[in-house]
Structures are given as C-alpha cells and as structure tokens.
Image (spheres, rainbow, N blue to C red):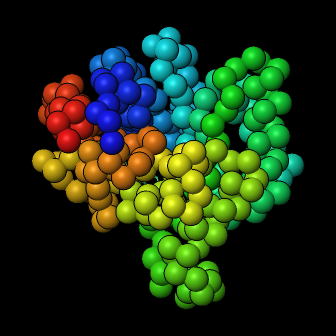
Amino acid sequence: MNKLTKEQIKEKLVLALDVETIEEAKNLVDELSPYIGTFKVGLQLFCGYGLEIVNYIKEKNSNFFLDVKLHDIPNTVEKASYNVIKNGANFFNVHATGGIDMMKAARKGADEASEKYNTKKPIILAVTVLTSISDEILKQELANNLTSEEFVIKLAKNAKEAGMNGVVASAKELKLIKKELGDDFIVLTPGIRPKWSCKDDQKRIVTPSDAIKDGSDYIVLGRAVTKADNRINATERIYQEILES
Ligand code: C5P
C-alpha cells in the first residue's frame, strides 16, 4: 500500500462525539477539526440536543455523519432519510436487517433531498450485525442459524443491491467484505484502538494502522482520543503511527 499523506489520513478519520453535553461536543470539534475529516453524532448527542451541533461542524468544513441507524417501514425511512440530508448530513446509516426495500427507500429519500438542496451525493452505510450480537444471541434469541460472519456477508450483499455505499463493520471482517463485495464498497470500522490506549468495553479491537492496511475506508476514533489527557497529542500519535506503518 502507498504511504498516505496527512490530508488522506484526515479524510479517513471519523471522530465519535459520544459526550454528555453540547459544550463538550463543541470543544472536541474546535480542538480536533484540523485533524478529523468527519464528526459522528450518535444517538446520545442527537437525543440530548437534536441537530444543534450541525452548523458548528459545517463551519469547520468538516463532514457530518448522523449515526441514527434507521430501521422502520420503507415509507418512514424514505421521509426520514430526506430530512437527514436536508438537515446537513453527508453520511448516515440504516440497519440492513430492515430489508432491501427499506434500504432502497433510504436511497430514494436521500437522493431526492440531495438533488433539491444541491449537496454532495449522500453516503449511506448499512449496519449489518451489531458487534454486541454474538453467534449465540443470533441463534438463541434471533432464531438465525447462520454464523455472524455469514450473516454479515449476506446483509452486505443486500445492502449493495439496494444501493447502499457500504457497511459499518468490525475491522476483523474487513478483508472478507472487500473480497466478497469489491474494493469500491465502503467499509467504516469502529472498535479502533492504538497500541498504547485502553480497550474500554470493546472486545475485538484493531489498531488504526492495521485497519488502514487491511483496506478500511474510514476509521472511527472514540474514547482513545476523547478520553485522552491530551486529545491533540493522542490524535498526533495516531497520525504518526499511520505514517510510520
Ligand atoms: O469509544 P469507542 O472507540 O469504543 O467508540 C466507538 C464508536 O463506534 C461508538 O460511537 C460506537 O457507538 C460506534 N460503534 C461501535 N461498534 C459498532 C458500531 C458502532 O463501537 N459495531
């Protein structure tokens, strides 16, 4: 793999704004926008403060990823997707288990809004199997006899058929997804930890440089940066690790 430039690294980095207050989220955007291409607003911040942070992210020319994992009937998802794009998201996600028609409806709603408001083509990612779902839960609670790996690939194929741009997946599944779905199918990987940081509650972690080496298009940084004593220093160390790999 060719060495990445600092600009290319920035494009790949997504920071999860999983914080309790809007002030903390704004501080993170202020501090880290020179290093981070995309800020991810998840359910915690969204349910607490709605879209208050959007303009703040946009002012820094950063991408806005609304991590709301839509899962509903196609009509509802189509209208919600329209509003997600209307309100300034560049990326958002849906659950692939909502089915192909639901994902097609997300594409339709998002593309209509993008055309109307003249935005960049929205990137929609599908969540396949949450990393909190084990093979045992799949079998016992969800009555599904596939292994999680087989189910991930089946759902990723559905997502591609429905016009999704890619999936959210563990970096452990990266190579398999790229092999089965092709290099152009985006894989965004959470569960990223530099060697020096603590694992928190994540079980299947991969370092930023290994995830990039294996083909990750976007890597999600969370507590490894947001809980560091010096967040800029932690981010610079991650850059260094990737540059030296
Ligand atoms: O702090 P940490 O690096 O563990 O944060 C990971 C982020 O990625 C969180 O926002 C979490 O919700 C998200 N995520 C994940 N595992 C998935 C899907 C999303 O950790 N399978």
Quadrant that contains the N terminus: top left
Q: Is residue 186 visible?
A: yes
Vertical arrangement, residue 172 with respect to residue 56, above or below? below
Query: 6 or 27, which is in the foreground?
Result: 6
Query: 213 or 56, which is in the foreground?
Result: 213
Residue in view at x 58 percent, y 73 percent:
151
Q: Is residue 170 visible?
A: no
Residue in view at x 51 percent, y 61 percent:
179
Vertical arrangement, residue 236 with respect to residue 175, above or below? above
Residue 94 placement (x, y as % from top left): 65, 51
Where residue 224 sits, quadrant-wise, is top left
Residue in view at x 16 percent, y 28 percent:
233
Vertical arrangement, residue 47 with respect to residue 144, above or below? above
Where residue 182 sits, quadrant-wise, is bottom right
Residue 69 placement (x, y as % from top left): 61, 50
Residue in view at x 32 percent, y 36 percent:
2
* 10 on left or right of 84: left
Residue 186 placement (x, y as % from top left): 54, 46
Report the residue that reaches farthest toward the top.
59
Quadrant that contains the C terminus: top left
* 58 on left or right of 192: right
Report the residue that reaches farthest toward the right.
75
Residue 80 placement (x, y as % from top left): 76, 40
